[in-house]
Image (cartoon, helix red, strand yellow):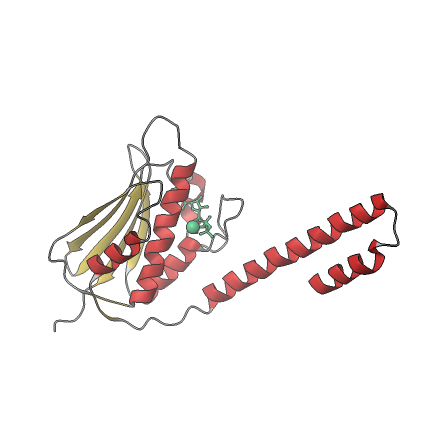
């Protein structure tokens, strides 16, 4: 479709009046960009549907969190780490949990974009702590919180309030954590903002 649109523009472009050529250029430009957007959506969905099964190993969650958050050091919103010392190792796929952390931190950042200048300073906190026979990972922010009407469907693919969102971020988080035999929950904090809590199984005793 993209090629045909471009060919159409090339072929007709110099046979038309300036005005018609301009209209043609706008229309073919629209076709090309919409096709690109569709392609991106299909690619994202394929990644979601084809998410490989996790390959879990003994994983130091604190170290992974530290590594991922290192990539956000220059971001405009400060991220506070509250990592439990001597956290037991979890049984998880490092690459997939990395993706989970990214998706949650990106959502927290997005949530804080809109509240900028609303009188409070934007903040994100990433916390780890032991929780019985599991380890808890929580990402919280002081943005506007989850839209109440979306909370029941928030883990479904394509549920989004963002003009350029795919709505796959939390669906991917949910799928990854389910496959890890863990659990994930969202909640709005009474004071302000959203919080996502993930529970992961402990690594088997060495
Ligand atoms: N920390 C948060 N605070 C408030 N709302 C949130 C937060 N995280 C997610 N949401 C809401 O949940 C919706 C779904 O999030 P999800 O990550 O699945 O998709 P998305 O962020 O919209 O798209 P993408 O992940 O492709 O950027 C968001 O559009 C937003 O409305
Ligand atoms: Mg997202």
Q: Give the x, y percent position of residue 38.
A: 61, 58
Residue 180 in sight from this viewpoint: no
Q: Give the x, y percent position of residue 31.
A: 70, 54
Q: What's the residue at 37%, 38% (across, down)? A: 145
Residue 108 in sight from this viewpoint: yes
Q: On the rendered image, what quadrant is the C terminus found in? A: bottom left
Tell which of 3 and 193 is nearer to you: 3
Q: Give the x, y percent position of residue 122.
A: 33, 35
Q: What's the residue at 29%, 52% (across, down)? A: 69
Q: What's the residue at 39%, 47% (across, down)? A: 107
Residue at the top extreme?
A: 119
Tell which of 88 and 6 is nearer to you: 6
Q: Is residue 6 above or below residue 111?
A: below
- For the image, the number of numbered tags is 0
Quarter of image, res 51 = bottom left
Tell which of 41 and 25 is nearer to you: 25
Q: On the rendered image, what quadrant is the N terminus found in? A: bottom right
Q: Give the x, y percent position of residue 27.
A: 75, 50
């Amino acid at each position: 479709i993209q090629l045909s649109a471009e060919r159409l523009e090339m072929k007709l472009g110099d046979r038309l009046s300036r005005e018609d050529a301009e209209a043609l250029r706008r229309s073919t430009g629209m076709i090309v960009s919409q096709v690109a957007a569709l392609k991106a959506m299909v690619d994202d969905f394929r990644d979601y549907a084809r998410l490989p099964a996790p390959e879990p190993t003994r994983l130091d969650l604190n170290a992974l969190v530290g590594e991922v958050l290192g990539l956000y050091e220059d971001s405009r919103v400060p991220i506070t780490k509250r990592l439990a010392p001597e956290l037991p190792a979890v049984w998880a796929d490092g690459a997939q949990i990395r993706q989970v952390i990214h998706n949650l931190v990106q959502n927290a950042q997005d949530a804080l974009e809109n509240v900028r200048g609303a009188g409070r300073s934007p903040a994100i906190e990433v916390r780890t702590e032991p929780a019985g026979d599991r380890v808890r990972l929580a990402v919280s922010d002081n943005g506007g919180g989850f839209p109440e009407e979306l909370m029941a469907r928030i883990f479904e693919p394509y549920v989004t309030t963002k003009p350029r969102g795919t709505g796959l971020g939390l669906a991917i988080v949910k799928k990854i954590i389910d496959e890890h035999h863990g659990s994930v929950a969202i909640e709005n904090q009474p004071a302000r903002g959203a919080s996502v809590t993930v529970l992961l199984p402990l690594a088997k005793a060495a």
